[in-house]
Amino acid sequence: MVRIQLELDLGYEVLTDNADFFFFIHAANTAHQTVLAENLVVTSPTAVWEIIQDGGPPAQRCLRVNAATGPLRVQYSATVQIRHILEEPSRIAETPVQQLPQEVLHYIYPSRYCQSDLLSNFATREFGNIQSGYSRVLGICDWVGQHVEYRYNSSNSQTSAYDTLVERVGVCRDFAHLMIAICRALNMPARIVTGTDYGADHRLGPPDFHAYVEVFLGHRWYLFDPSGVAIPMGMVRLATGRDAADVAFATIFGGVSSEQPIIKDFAVTDPFNEWEWPSHTSLALSTDEMSPAPLHRC
């Protein structure tokens, strides 16, 4: 098991009469990720806020804040325990479309930033002849990491997977979108997950929010980080969706200026409690319960 201490500090100045904020900054509670303790502080003379939890899976929480003109500060901390599933990659097969669970199907369709329909010919040409299964997905992940340059501030809120394929430059969300679109083009459900970039090289800048990928294989979601900047075992799940439009850590309506987020995440280790230090592994990594096999009908 891995235990992570997470601390977030977000600062804003509301410039208009009022503004609405939607934050996905709470650690998600899942079968393999447990929030042991957490604390939220919203500081503003005018703010009204509430936390809304969706039905999942995976269940995630949205902090909704309305604030009038003036300063707003949101501080969140949590102690999170993650129990990873480690499997031998050679044993993991792709799931035929006709066997996909109903709740997985919408992750196989094109979405706002992941236009898998536009990448169909490319995906088939580059990866269609590779043996199916976990190894093919890993090949896609490696290809994206090798052919796209990580460059801070190289993309914007309009940049899509197709744009990244053409321009070959981006940040973590662009790497994730491109990998997701290629997987979907090959009929493999894929989705984006947001967390923090635990273990990232300090030369890339201060700790930040991070986007990575889950692909549905063998009736389970497996983790991939095509940008390669973080250590997957240390990534805490905040939100899960089709693409960045679903999972942005902050969506804001109104005139607002913002400070650079302050993010801290560090591992808590204790050999007597089997808390491990997050590390890279060649095994397939998942934090998802296996979905039940679908019913076969005549």
Image (spheres, helix red, strand yellow):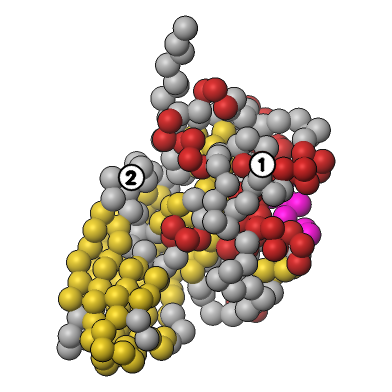
Earlier sequence position, callout 1 versus callout 2? 2
Residue shown at 55% from the left, 71% from the top = 157
Q: CA distance from mark 1 to mark 2?
A: 25 Å
Residue shown at 44% from the left, 40% from the top = 288
The reply to whether the magenta stretch includes residue 144 is yes
Which residue was labeled with disc 1? 185
Establish if 183 lies above or below 278: above
Viewed as shown, does residue 248 lie left or right of 206? left
* Structural crowding at the residue carrying mark 1, measured as other residues with C-alpha within 10 Å and reported as few (<14), some (14–19) or many (≥20): many
Q: Label 1 amino acid?
A: Ala
Residue 212 in sight from this viewpoint: no
Establish if 28 lies above or below 294: below
Residue 139, x across and y down, in percent: 74, 44
Instruction: Place residue 166 in its image quadrant.
Output: bottom right
Task: Assign a secondary structure to mark 1.
Answer: helix
Residue shown at 78% from the left, 59% from the top = 147
Q: Label 2 amino acid?
A: Gly
User: How many numbered badges does the structure rendering display?
Assistant: 2
Which residue was labeled with disc 2? 56
